[in-house]
Image (spheres, helix red, strand yellow):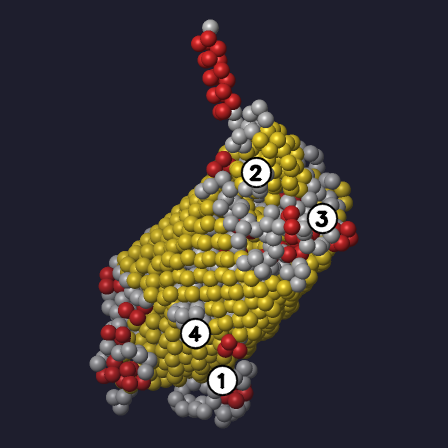
Amino acid sequence: MKRLLLLIAVVTATLAALAQRNVTGKVIEAETNEPLAMTTVKLLKTDSTMAKGGLTATNGSFSIAAPADGKYILQVTCIGFKTYHKNITISGGKNMPLGTISMEPDAIMLKGATVTGRALKVTTREDTFVYNAAAYRTPEGSVVEELIKRLPGAKIDDDGNITINGKEVKKILVDGKEFMVGDTKTALKNLPTSIIEKVKSYDEKSDLARVSGIDDGEEQTVLDFGIKKGMNKGLLSNADLSYGTKDRYAARLMAMRFTDKLRLMGFGSANNTNDRGFGGRGGRFGGGRRGLQSSKMLGLNFNYEEKDKLRLDGSVRWNHGDGDTRTKNSTENFVSTEGSFSNSLNQSYSRSDSWNAQMRFEWHPDTMTTIMFRPTFSYSTSDGISLSESATFNEDPYLYVSDPLAAASIEQMATDSMAVNSRRNSSITYSESKSFGGMLMFNRRLNNDGRNVTLRLRGNFGDSESKSLSTNNVHLYKTKNMLGQDSTYQTNRYNLTPQKNWDYSIRATYSEPIFKATFLQFSYEFQYKYTKSDRSTFDFSNLGENFFAGLSPVYRGWDDYLNRLENPYTTYFDEDLSRFSEYKNYIHDIEVMMRIIRPTYNLNFGVTVMPQKTNFVQRYQGVTTDTTRTVTNISPTLDFRWKISKVSQLRVRYRGTTSQPSMSDLLDITDDSDPLNISMGNPGLKPSFTNTLNMFYNNYIENHYKTLMANFRFQTTSNSISNMVRYDPETGGRTTRPENINGNWSTRGQFLFNSAIDSAGLFNVSTNTEIRYTNSVGYVSIDNQDSQKNTTRSTSFEEELTAGFRNDWFEFELNGSVEYEHSRNKLQPNSNLDTWEFAYGFNSNVRLPWGTEVAFDLNMNSRRGYSDESLNTNELIWNAQVSQSFLKGKNLIVMLQFYDLLHQQSNFSRTINAMQRSDTEYNAITSFGMLHVIYRLNLFGSKEARQNMQPRGPRDRGMGPRGPRGGGFGRPGRF
């Protein structure tokens, strides 16, 4: 009996020791009752040391195992909300359900602008990626461009285009509402990161698909910036003024006014720093530094909404730009089994002004009817001047000279029969254009089972005029004149080109439910497109190389050149070189789709048939053409989406598209207006057909806070249209003729993984892997011999890896990336490439207790495997920043930023395809410093909430959200 009692006692004690004592609950927003995901929940001992911690799941729930019975403090912190505290007592090894915890907006934190963050970086919800902005620290005063650079799988190219998870971002939303439609750069350069809570990435359906339910295949990838909770009412403004070394300046002003129904956002900026952000990706090779650019911008965006009744969205913006770009280019053309190398140096200047306006009016007169109207307007002017010199060689000039374009170098190469030609060009251009258009759509749901009808009307009109003057002096070193001297010629021309275009379309769609959650969809659209261009060319060529000596191009300065002519320029009108063209397109679009909707999957499949009639009239080079072509394009499509869970999906998409050759390519006309670049038409061209397959998978593992994504793309084209090049080694000239060719295909795969290592989210690791293969084919020929098929096979591998630690006051991240390019050329194996570009380094951010923040990044960027040894470089890039906050709410910030302290940043880019390899260097802004003064005015919430905006007592210090955070420049990116 004693043994039995002893056994029972031991078992009871063991069970008590093994009791989980789980503290459970759910965290929601007090205002909306929506769950709060990725919220930090801590179980603190009575001395405020942490006993256990974790993050809430996507539905806001949490479960934390207490280490032992006793008294604890439960602390819940979330971006934009007051810190929640609750004293709890656990006894008897029992679980403690706390029910629902409501989080109130924190006006004090909002005024401070940014918070501490032990937060998971990214999660997924079906097809949506949700990035936690607090997990990606950005410098003080930075805009969302700096935040996007840090997102896993995101890229911003030199032209400001965004791609994320392999897809180009076409639209920006703010809290799900349209923002500056048609212009992603305004958001990138003006929205401050301090107001952003999260960023969503997903594919948004077109207006027609959203309203009618008929998938028209016109999805576009969007970035949706969610503003911190509590900022939906009130006033926010942000002013950032800065001046730096080398006379660099930047100014940015932003103001936002929010009410229950209306949002107004105004922006203004001016800078001469290429609109360049700070740090971010460790200073990749050539990234975002093409030339010297200055810009000015004014913009206004508004959103008005009466829920389920009326929605108005609109924006207007003015942009001005000035450019100063100097490029040095070296190209190897794969035009034959012999070598063809060209070098060029170009100096160009530009200036532009543009006005753009757009609006959306969406009205729901009743629950079954939707009426939408979208008007647009744009007006722009653009000026440009250019000076360039170039030369072509039959050997790689860098094997013999250091500067191929120097006069002595060209003379030496010509003496050795290696120089083919040289050119000197100058040009002046001006263009003016205006356009307006609109879309009107009406949708009526005929019942609640999915039967509906939609009618859409669209129309656009455009009018433009351009002027250009160019001078061109050419030396041919292998072609001699009658005196045995190098052959020379000049082409000097003045062009006036007015152009008009308009189009309209009408589309009707109908959806019929044939079974439960199964729909048969029909769509018909008629389009008419008209374009007319009437170029007048005035030719005053071969007046001698020095005829325009002493003149330098200036904006709209063609009169200086025209006044030097002996006769009025109108007497030099050349009817053969002038060109009149007129297009009329009549397009019918007939689509039949089957749409199946199930709880676990969606399936869309169908076909589009497009009969098309084109009439083309042209007068050029003494030939008048009036031809009509009738073709039919067929495009099958399939879209399958498997909803594995609320946070995971697999999507497979296929689309086949037919592309017809352009009318100008089909005309049997030879254009020799430029003797070194002659083009010919080909009446025998066939249409090309492209197959595209996309697969996309994502998942979020809540128990381990892991996010993973994989996507795959395969594309192949039959009867591709490629330019067959006939190269003349005597002149360096090329004659191109479009030809059909088979063999072009490519594939791409990407894998992304992000995970918190510990339950509190202090440690995080992320990896992004991408592999691409391209088989690119083209035709080449020499001496008018039969053309040869050339193939370039390129394989590239890219890997990014980051690992970091972050707590309330300190952040440290190690980062590395590598890119390997393997290229093989069939006709010129000596042009094969095996190049490496890699980077490694770290960044750190320290927040000191007296309002000072110090941040810096240090990264080594390296290149290897280039034939030009000057490109095989190591570049140690060091950026640094220090900032100090002032005033009670830390509304005033003074900041010093230093770019490329070691002066090692380069400006180089490379492109390669079946026809050529091209390397380009640019002038750029690299090393400089800036002094910033930033002031923020934030008034949010009710009057009572604003009255409570005063510093907290000692009890709350270090426990709740804190003031502004800066620094942290992210990881190095691809070169």
Q: How far apart are marks 4 and 1 (CA)?
A: 20 Å
Instruction: Report if residue 684 is visible in the image.
Output: no
> Which one is nearer the viewer's eye here, 641 or 893?
893
Residue 236: x, y in percent? 69, 59
Q: Residue 553 carries which label?
A: 1
Other residues around mark 1 within 10 Å, as few (<14) / some (14–19) / many (≥20): some
Q: Name the residue under label 2.
A: 45
Judged by depth in the image, the label closer to the viewer, 2 or 4, is: 2
Of badges 2 and 1, the one in the foreground is 2
Q: Mark 3 points at which residue?
A: 371
Front disc: 3 or 2:
2
Q: Which of marks 4 and 1 is nearer the N terminus?
A: 1
Q: Where is residue 295 in the image (x, y as percent from the top left)?
A: 57, 71
Q: Which of the marked residues, 1 or 3, is nearer the chain's N terminus?
A: 3
Horizontally, residue 729 falls left or right of residue 195, namely left
In which quarter of the view is residue 817 placed?
bottom left
Image height check: is 397 above or below 360? Answer: below
Q: Distance between the residues labelled 2 and 1?
A: 76 Å
Question: Dot 3 lies on which element?
Answer: strand
Q: Which of marks 1 and 3 is in front?
A: 1
Q: Do the residues labelled 1 and 3 touch (CB within 8 Å)?
A: no
Mark 3: which amino acid? Ile
Mark 4, residue position? 923
- Can residue 268 be seen here? yes
Real-space CA distance between mark 3 and mark 4, rounded to the nearest whole angstrom:
51 Å
Say which amino acid is labelled 2.
Lys
**Kind of residue indicated by mark 4:** Asn
Q: Observer-nearest residue: 422 or 133?
A: 133
**Numbered disc in front, either 3 or 4:** 4
Q: Earlier in the sequence, mark 3 or mark 4?
A: 3
